[in-house]
Image (spheres, rainbow, N blue to C red):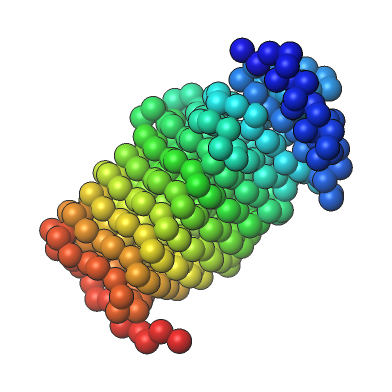
Amino acid sequence: MFGLKACAALAAIAATIGLCAPVQAGAGISAWVSAAGQDVSGCGIVTSPCRTFQYAHDNILGANGGDILVRDSGNYGPLNITKSVSVVNDSAGTAGTGAPANQTTITVNTLGAVLLKGLTLDGVNGAYNGVTVLGPGNVTIASCTVMNFSRYGVYINASTGNVNFSIMDTLVQNSIQGVGTDGIGPYSVSGDLNNVRIVGNSLAGVNAAFLGAQHLTIADTLISRNNDGLFASGASAVVALRHSTITSNTQGYNIVSPAVVQTYGDNVISGNGGNSGTLTPVSPN
């Protein structure tokens, strides 16, 4: 139980760092959530947190967005993001979030910047996608676990504007597709995967199928035990592989021309059932 002494201690710390109330943090506001919180007017201070991500997003953060901070372990429900928001769990335990069957756990549809850090997204094999990016903007997913979704772990659909995204230090596993890009021109997708483990997805680990201009960098990443480790298609798709391992997939890579997958010569691609298409060797700068 979160007792009075602990509350007092947190209040003292919060006062010291300026978090004893939802305060202006640059252009935004900070709001705390907790498994013991309540979604009521005025929630969001560290000693009186909100209960769900969505309530904090809709009712506590201003129009310019802000930070949703996790105080302790809990399931904080699905989230539809429509402004610049950071959802941050800095080692407070397991900050879980899920969605009902045939829905998406976190949807991003904003021109702003979004950070998802330290979250556990579990679709329990019924929810469609872990993270869906629908609109233009900049999205970073860091130190998260994304698993058990009936479509995509992370789905980038640049259907309304250019999307920049980064996934780092994250596990994406046991979904139909791991990380996928989709949509049509004239918009573009630019993304990078750094130190990501993409394992056990029943179709593609990485599905780079965007039809517009696309550039994806995969570095220091493990892609294993998927059907296709890497699938790349699209007339303007360029994927760069650096210092990564593609192993134990039914097919290591499946490149559909004119898509281009560049290799810098420092990857390990072995132990797969086969490959389709041709890698393009390039020299590191």
Q: Residue at x 77, y 43 (%)?
A: 65
The residue closer to the viewer here, 180 or 146, is: 146
Q: Is residue 277 visible?
A: yes
Q: Is residue 239 left or right of residue 67?
A: left
Residue 58 sits above or below residue 146 on the image: above
The residue closer to the viewer here, 169 or 5, is: 5
Q: Residue 88: horizontal and vertical position, in percent?
A: 63, 41
> Where is residue 87, by image quadrant?
top right
Residue 108 sits above or below residue 181 on the image: above
Q: Is residue 160 left or right of residue 168?
A: right
The residue closer to the viewer here, 214 or 143, is: 143
Q: Where the N terminus falls, by quadrant?
A: top right
Q: Residue 183: horizontal and vertical position, in percent?
A: 50, 57
Q: Residue at x 84, y 50 (%)?
A: 26
Q: Residue 137: horizontal and vertical position, in percent?
A: 65, 56
Residue 120 sits above or below residue 72 on the image: below
Q: Residue at x 82, y 46 (%)?
A: 25
Q: Is residue 56 visible?
A: no
> Where is residue 90, by image quadrant?
top right
> Where is residue 70, by image quadrant?
top right
Q: Residue at x 30, y 56 (%)?
A: 223
Q: Is residue 237 left or right of residue 87?
A: left
Residue 176 sits above or below residue 139 on the image: above
